[in-house]
Image (tube, rainbow, N blue to C red):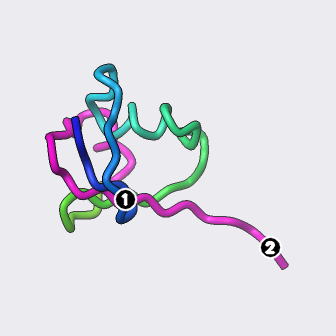
Amino acid sequence: MGVILNGELIQLPEHVVFVSDVLKHYEIHDKVVVVEINGEILTSSEHQSTRLADKDRIEIVHFVGGG
């Protein structure tokens, strides 16, 4: 399936079906992230139940500490 992830057109593997799968695929599932799908921000509890579709626009922001 082809999606736009953080502004870049990518092809996701077939096993990536839910938002939580994307986070696992990119190994950011254990970080605090904000995910937006087609302009709508998801709560973390929605990550496992939100199914992706071809041409979805996904924005993922994770926080980096520093000082």
Instruction: Specify which label sits upstream in the sequence, 1 or 2.
Output: 1
Left or right, 13 with respect to 53, comes to right
At mark 2, the secondary structure is loop
Q: Looking at the rendering, which quadrant does residue 49 occupy? A: top left
Alpha carbon distance from label 1 to label 2: 27 Å
Check the image and name the residue furthest to the bottom. 67
* Position of residue 16 measured from the top left corner of the image (x, y, whole percent): 33, 28
- Image label count: 2
Q: Image quadrant for the C terminus?
A: bottom right
Asked if the residues shown at circle 1 and circle 2 are in contact, with their CB atoms under 8 angstroms apart, the answer is no
Q: Which residue is mark 2?
A: 66
Q: Residue at x 39, y 31 (%)?
A: 21
Range shown magenta = 43-67
Q: Residues within 10 Å of mark 2 (few under 14, many from 20)?
A: few
Q: Is 62 part of what is drawn in magenta?
A: yes
Residue 53: mark: none
* Position of residue 7 measured from the top left corner of the image (x, y, whole percent): 35, 65
Q: Looking at the rendering, which quadrant does residue 6 occupy? A: bottom left
Give the camera-side residue of 49 and 23.
Answer: 23
Q: Residues within 10 Å of mark 1 (few under 14, many from 20)?
A: few
Give the camera-side residue of 53 and 47.
Answer: 53
* Position of residue 56 measured from the top left corner of the image (x, y, whole percent): 19, 51
Q: Residue at x 15, y 42 (%)?
A: 54
Q: Main secondary structure of the magenta part?
A: loop
Residue type at the position of mark 2:
Gly
Q: Is 49 part of what is drawn in magenta?
A: yes
Q: Residue at x 28, y 44 (%)?
A: 46
Residue type at the position of mark 1:
Glu
Q: Which residue is mark 1?
A: 8
